[in-house]
Image (cartoon, rainbow, N blue to C red):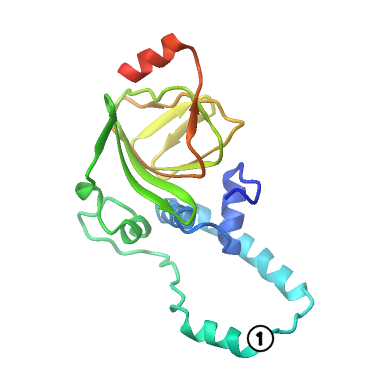
C-alpha cells in the first residue's frame, strides 16, 4: 500500500476496481460491499473507467509469448464476487472475510491487549498487518496517528472519533494525517477487521494515555 496515495474510501474503491490492492485490503473492500450493497454501483463505475482506459492504450507486443500463455493457463480460475452471497444462518462474518480467515467470529482466539480491548492477529499477509479487534462498549482507544495506512472495517457495533461515526459495514481510512482517539459506542461491543501498513504511533498527553490504557 505504500506505492500510492490512499486517503479516502473512493481511492480505495478505485484501486479495488483496478485490481491493484494487496490481498487483505481486497478482502476488506469485498466484505464492505457485501455489507453495504449501495456502494456496488460506484465500484462498477470505476471498473468501466478502467476498461475504457485499457481500450485506449496502445497494444504492446509480448516479449515471451509461450511463458505468458503458461502463466495464464496455470493460474487459478477467476472467482467473481457473488452479488447476493449466501451465508450460513449462524454466520457473523461476511463471506469474503470468513473465506479469507478460515473461521467465523465465534472461533476467534482473542488475546487481551488492554482492559476492554482484545485483538487477534493473522500476521503479515501480502505486506500488510492483518487483525481483528474487539472493544467493550464505551471503550476508548488511546490517541494515536499512523506511520502508514490503516483500513478498518466495522463488523458489528460502532465507534466515533474526530471524523464522525463509523457503523457496521463502514470503512475507516487513516494515515499519518489523522490523529484520533476512537471510542466504541455504549450499546454493544465494537468488532472490526483491520489491515495496516505500519504500526500506529501513540500521541496525546501522558495523563490521557495512562487513563486510556487503564480503560
Residue 71 in the image: x percent, y percent? 53, 82
Q: Is residue 55 above or below residue 65?
A: above
Q: Considering the numbered disc 1 on the image, is that residue within a helix, a strand or a loop?
A: loop
The residue where tag 1 is placed is 64
Q: Would you call the spot at circle 1 few (<14 residues within 10 Å), some (14-19), or many (20 or more)?
A: few
Up the image or down, 179 lies above or below 172; here it is: above
204 left or right of 130 in image: right
Measuring from the top left, give residue 177's x and y in whole percent.
61, 31
Residue placed at 60% from the left, 84% from the top? 68
Q: Position of residue 120 (x, y in %)?
A: 30, 42
Task: Please give left or right for residue 56 compared with residue 204 in the image.
Answer: right
How many numbered marks appear?
A: 1
Residue 84: x %, y % from top left: 38, 64
Q: Residue at x 58, y 61 (%)?
A: 20
Residue 160 is drawn in which quadrant? top left
Q: In the picture provided, is 191 more to the left or to the right than 179?
A: left
**Foreground: 61 or 90?**
61
**Front-lying residue, 170 or 114:** 114
Closer to us: 121 or 84 = 121
Q: Is residue 215 visible?
A: no
Can residue 2 be seen in the rendering of this structure? yes
Occupied quadrant, residue 213? top left
Amino acid at each position: 500500500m505504500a506505492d500510492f496515495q490512499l486517503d479516502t474510501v473512493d481511492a480505495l474503491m478505485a484501486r479495488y476496481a483496478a485490481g491493484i490492492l494487496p490481498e487483505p485490503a481486497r478482502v476488506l473492500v469485498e466484505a464492505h460491499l457485501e455489507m453495504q450493497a449501495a456502494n456496488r454501483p460506484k465500484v462498477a463505475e470505476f471498473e468501466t473507467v478502467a476498461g475504457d482506459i485499457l481500450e485506449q492504450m496502445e497494444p504492446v507486443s509480448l516479449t515471451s509469448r509461450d511463458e505468458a500463455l503458461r502463466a495464464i493457463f496455470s493460474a487459478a480460475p477467476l472467482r467473481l464476487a457473488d452479488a447476493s452471497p449466501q451465508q450460513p444462518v449462524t454466520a457473523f462474518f461476511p463471506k469474503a472475510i470468513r473465506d479469507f480467515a478460515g473461521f467465523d467470529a465465534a472461533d476467534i482466539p482473542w488475546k487481551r491487549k488492554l482492559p476492554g480491548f482484545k485483538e487477534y492477529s493473522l500476521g503479515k499477509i501480502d505486506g500488510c498487518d492483518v487483525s481483528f479487534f474487539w472493544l467493550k462498549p464505551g471503550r476508548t482507544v488511546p490517541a494515536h496517528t499512523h506511520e502508514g495506512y490503516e483500513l478498518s472495517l466495522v463488523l458489528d457495533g460502532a465507534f466515533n472519533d474526530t471524523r464522525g461515526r463509523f457503523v457496521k459495514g463502514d470503512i475507516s481510512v487513516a494515515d499519518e494525517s489523522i490523529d484520533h482517539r476512537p471510542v466504541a459506542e455504549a450499546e454493544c461491543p465494537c468488532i472490526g477487521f483491520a489491515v495496516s501498513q505500519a504500526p500506529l504511533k501513540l500521541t496525546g498527553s501522558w495523563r490521557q494515555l495512562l487513563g486510556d490504557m487503564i480503560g
